Amino acid sequence: MSGEKLRPEDAPPSLYDDQGNARFFADPAMDRFVAVVMNLAQEVWVQEERLLALEAEKTGKSADPEAKVKEFIDRVFAPIREA
């Protein structure tokens, strides 16, 4: 790819800034803040998976990965759901 941003053909142009980045909030800083929070959540989940693997190795019992990821997502997005 030539560095071109992908977007659906039928997407309203108002959803994108001049550089082709999707924007969800009126303040572009808020979009960047949400991206930072999501990157941090990804890193925390990686650590959580590593801990689960170590615990499973040590105890011989493995947790249900589907249930664990659902719990994690529920915790991360709880403030949004409460609003």
Image (cartoon, helix red, strand yellow):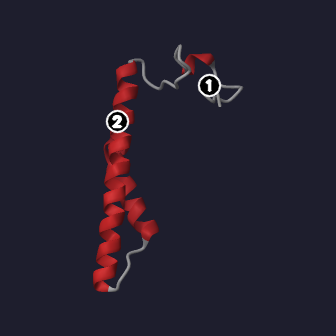
- When the figure is inspected, residue 71 is found, relative to residue 62, above or below; the finding is above
Residue under the point 40% across and 20% down: 28
Residue 44 placement (x, y as % from top left): 31, 53
- When the figure is inspected, residue 62 is found, relative to residue 16, above or below; the finding is below
Residue under the point 46% across and 67% down: 66
Residue 26 placement (x, y as % from top left): 42, 18
Residue extending farthest front: 2
- The quarter holding residue 83 reads top left
Residue under the point 48% across and 24% down: 23
Residue 57 placement (x, y as % from top left): 33, 80
Residue extending farthest right: 9
What secondary structure is marked by label 2? helix
What secondary structure is marked by label 1? loop
Whichever of labels 1 and 2 marks the residue nearer the N terminus, that label is: 1
- When the figure is inspected, residue 38 is found, relative to residue 3, above or below; the finding is below
Along the horizontal axis of the image, is 54 left or right of 16?
left
Residue under the point 34% across and 36% down: 36
Residue extending farthest bottom: 60
Q: Quadrant of the N terminus?
A: top right
- The answer, for residue 83, to whether it is visible in the render is no
Q: Nearer the viewer, residue 63 or 39?
A: 39
Residue 2 placement (x, y as % from top left): 64, 26
- The answer, for residue 78, to whether it is visible in the render is yes
Q: Nearer the viewer, residue 35 or 15?
A: 35
Q: Residues within 10 Å of mark 2 (few under 14, many from 20)?
A: few
Residue position for label 2: 36
Amino acid type shown at disc 2: Val
Which dot marks residue 4?
1
Q: CA distance from mark 1 to mark 2?
A: 22 Å
